[in-house]
Image: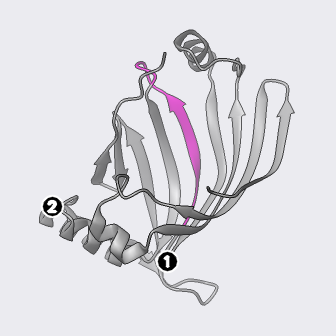
Amino acid sequence: ETPIDPQAVHPSGDSLTLDLTTRDIGVPASLINGSALEVLGPAVEAFSTEIQIKGALDTRSADVEALTAWRDGGGTVEVASIELQWNTLRITANGTLALDGELQPVGSFATRIAGLEDFITAMEEGGVLSSSDASIARITLAVLTRASDDGGPPRAEIPITLQDRIVRLGPVALIQLPPIVWE
């Protein structure tokens, strides 16, 4: 069981703000390949986020009609912050999510990542990334990595996008997500 400690939920008009912090999140082996689990370990040490769901959303049901009305009314999920610590991988991000015409998530995030080199290698060794995509990721990472202002490890500032169920790190397609089937 994952201990989740919601710090605050703030409903306000047509929006809802959620602050969430959790620690020691077990990562199912089916979610990520074995090579990445070997490098990163079986648990995310810490995860926190602050999100605001904007737009009138009927939270009593997440059915197709309610989600379509929310999307058509300009509904978005504004992610003020995400922080993840998983072994050597450190990620901070902010961005926006919405739903496309097929009610699949789309989004864009400004992301700062440290410790990505080992993760790219693990994804390549596990067959998730081809050698050419891993090479592109390494070149992109080398160009975008800067020394940290706070004395921590160097980090890259890389856009992460989600469109057509494909998660991209800069120009590199990382993973295709299965479709969400709303009922």
Residue drawn at point x = 85 percent, y = 39 percent: 10
Please identify the residue farthest to the left as the structure is shown: 131
Total labels: the figure holds: 2
* Residue 87: assigned label: 1
x and y percentages locating residue 12 in the rendered image: 86, 31
Estimate how packed mark 2 is, as few (under 14), some (14 to 19) or many (20 or more) residues with alpha carbons within 10 Å.
Answer: some
Q: Is residue 140 among the parts visible in the rendering?
A: no
- Tell me the quarter of the picture where residue 140 sits: bottom left
Residue drawn at point x = 35 percent, y = 57 percent: 32
Estimate how packed mark 1 is, as few (under 14), some (14 to 19) or many (20 or more) residues with alpha carbons within 10 Å.
Answer: some
x and y percentages locating residue 88 in the rendered image: 47, 79
Q: Secondary structure at mark 1?
A: loop
- Tell me the quarter of the picture where residue 36 sits: bottom left
The amino acid beneath tag 1 is Asn
Q: Is residue 94 magenta?
A: yes
The amino acid beneath tag 2 is Ser
Where does the magenta region start and end? 91-103
x and y percentages locating residue 120 in the rendered image: 30, 70
In the figure, is residue 168 to the left or right of 52?
Answer: left
Q: Main secondary structure of the magenta part?
A: strand
Vertical position of residue 12 compared to residue 90: above or below: above
Query: What residue did someone put label 2 on?
Result: 130
Residue drawn at point x = 41 percent, y = 73 percent: 40
